[in-house]
Image (tube, helix red, strand yellow):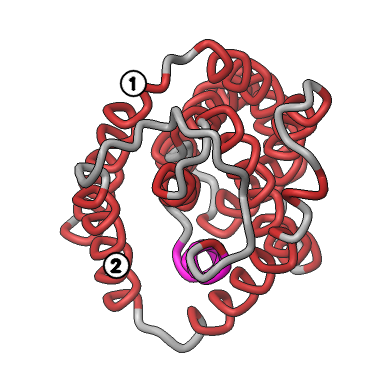
Amino acid sequence: MEFVLLYLIGICATTLGTLAGGGGLISLPVMLLMGMPVHSAIGANKVSNTISSFSSFYHLYKKKEISLKESLWMIPVSLGGGITGGFIASRLSGDKMYILAIILLIFAFITSFKGKKHFSGTEPLRMNRVSIPGLFGIGMYDGLFGPGQGTLMLYLFGYMNIAYIRAVALARLATFSSCFGAAITYIAAGKILWPMTLALLLGSLTGAQIGVRMAERLKPKYVQPLLRMVTVALMIQILAEKVF
């Protein structure tokens, strides 16, 4: 029964994660309630996110929504940020990490109300003074803390006037990049409970394909409200974890 539950969790979490980020809102708390050790739960998330996020990106790449020339340079930038974040995390207290997460999410929430960019733009992703530090910084945040990485990435691409469906493809590639190294680390450390992780992974693959097809049909005007709802939910979850 627990494997069926994990499969369903994977579907729900990755569908949400593909559309607006924040899939960890669903998966991590439920896995912890099921009694999974915290490192095993995080490791299961990283393994499933690595594979499912790449499957979403590949679907959109095959449909020519995104090109490798435009997107491949993201991988070392996001990966480098993730490695840097993991290094810093080992030297920061938990309290400081919670504060950083809340500040970043509040900043993203406030900036979402500035301007009139609603993911209906036509700009390509370019290497510039916004994209490089933005991708590196969010990759570093993912290595430091994690929850909300996909949501912050979509805010960045919205700010850069990139169309929503292409922003989804880019965010999923960035998620793949930042999760890949972490997944290898958890596997090497022997933290992965493979039967439960594989159940979550199968659900995540299903959710990734559902989410990416929903994203193709989602009108850009609905993206910002969805992102704001996920952002508020993330802030509430992080604050609740800190208080309780």
Residue 234 at what x, y percent from top left?
30, 45
Residue on which disc 1 sits: 221
What separation in Å lies between label 2 and label 1 (alpha carbons)? 31 Å
The amino acid at mark 2 is Tyr
What secondary structure is found at the residue carrying circle 2?
helix
Sooner in the amino-acid sequence: mark 2 or mark 1: 2
Which of label 2 and label 1 is nearer to you?
Answer: 1
- Residue position for label 2: 98
* Residue 205 vertical placement versus 111 (above, below): above
Residue drawn at (44%, 33%) of the image: 20
Residue 72, given in percent of the width and then of the height, sits at 78, 54
Q: Is residue 112 above or below residue 20?
A: below
The image position of residue 212, as x and y in percent, is 62, 22
Identified by mark 1, the residue type is Lys
Q: Nearer the viewer, residue 225 or 161?
A: 161
Q: How crowded is the residue under tag 2: few (<14 C-alpha within 10 Å), some, or many (20+)?
A: some
Of residues 121 and 49, the one nearer the viewer is 121
Q: Per the image, is 85 magenta? A: no
Q: Is residue 63 left or right of residue 79?
A: right
The quadrant of the rendering that contains the N terminus is top right
How many numbered discs? 2
Magenta span: 132-145
Find numbered disc 1 in the image and state the secondary structure of the residue it sits on.
helix
Residue at 40% x, 84% y is: 92
Task: Answer whether residue 95 is visible to the viewer in this image.
Answer: yes
